[in-house]
Image (cartoon, rainbow, N blue to C red):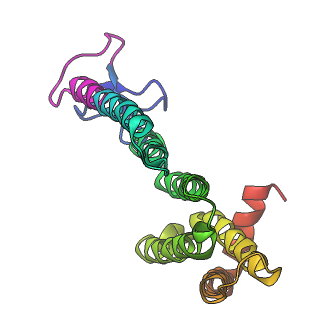
Amino acid sequence: MNQCKRCGVEIVDDTAVCPLCETILTTDGDGQTDTYPDVRSQTKIFRLLLKLFVFVLVVLEMIFLVADYYSDDRFSWSLITGVCFLYAIFTIYYSFNRRNSHIRKMYWQTLAGMFFLLLLDRVTGSSGWSVVYAMPCAVLFLDAVLAVCMLFNRRDWQSYLLVQLFVLLVSAILLALFLFGVTAKPALPWTAFLVSAILFSLCFCIGNRTAKNELKKRFYI
């Protein structure tokens, strides 16, 4: 009988991975055995490919920095590739980590994406396109993803409320930047805020008590 060291449960079938936390199981204290499928070998190969991919990106960025330094271009295009490579490395190491839930991945991936958009905007000359166009579009895209996830996961829809609150806060900040005259394009900030507010309020209208209990649990109220 297999046993999971992390969860402490015993698995009656001959699977090699715990169905709860996906940890490699041990068999009655005899240590790990290579059973079909060989999960450990697949994990090692996957990690090796990730390290190889990151190494290739680092080498490419070094080549781009040297080429940019000796070129006559006034614009440092190698900084843009560096920002894109950093975001790709973060995505690979965080999003492909099985220990992270898909909700946590959505939250941190969106937060990292907005940070790298601001950084990319700064590298290209701080023209403000990330705040005016890119970030409102990212908010609308995440609203659509949240709506689809709640429809397909109706039994646990309240688990997405924290991400919705984060999206609503970001859209409110973008709208405040427009209202205080920092940005001059009203369409996308207003659209992002209204869609986020409608989605968040709709969840409270449909599941009032469930939504309140979820927020109380998250914020320890």
Left/right placement of residue 164 relative to residue 120 reads right
210 and 41: which one is in front?
41
Q: Is residue 97 visible?
A: no
* Segment tinted magenta in the rendering: 27-49
50 and 118: which one is in front?
118
Residue at (24%, 34%) from the top-left corner? 15
Residue at (52%, 66%) from the top-left corner? 156
Q: Quadrant of the N terminus?
A: top left
Residue at (68%, 69%) from the top-left corner? 170
- In the image, residue 53 lies in the stretch drawn in magenta: no
Q: Horizontal and vertical percent for residue 108?
A: 56, 52
Q: Is residue 145 visible?
A: yes
Displayed quadrant of residue 185:
bottom right
Number of on-image labels: 0
Q: Horizontal and vertical percent for residue 164?
A: 63, 70
Residue at (70%, 83%) from the top-left corner? 184
Q: Is residue 82 placed above or below 202 in the rendered structure? A: above
Q: Is residue 79 placed above or below 110 in the rendered structure? A: above
Displayed quadrant of residue 17:
top left
Which residue in the rendered view is the most extreme toward the top? 30
Q: Horizontal and vertical percent for residue 89?
A: 42, 40
Which residue in the rendered view is the most extreme toward the front? 72
Displayed quadrant of residue 51:
top left
Q: Quadrant of the C terminus?
A: bottom right
206 and 185: which one is in front?
185
Which residue in the rendered view is the most extreme toward the left? 36
Left/right placement of residue 60 relative to residue 111 reads left
Q: Horizontal and vertical percent for residue 119?
A: 59, 52
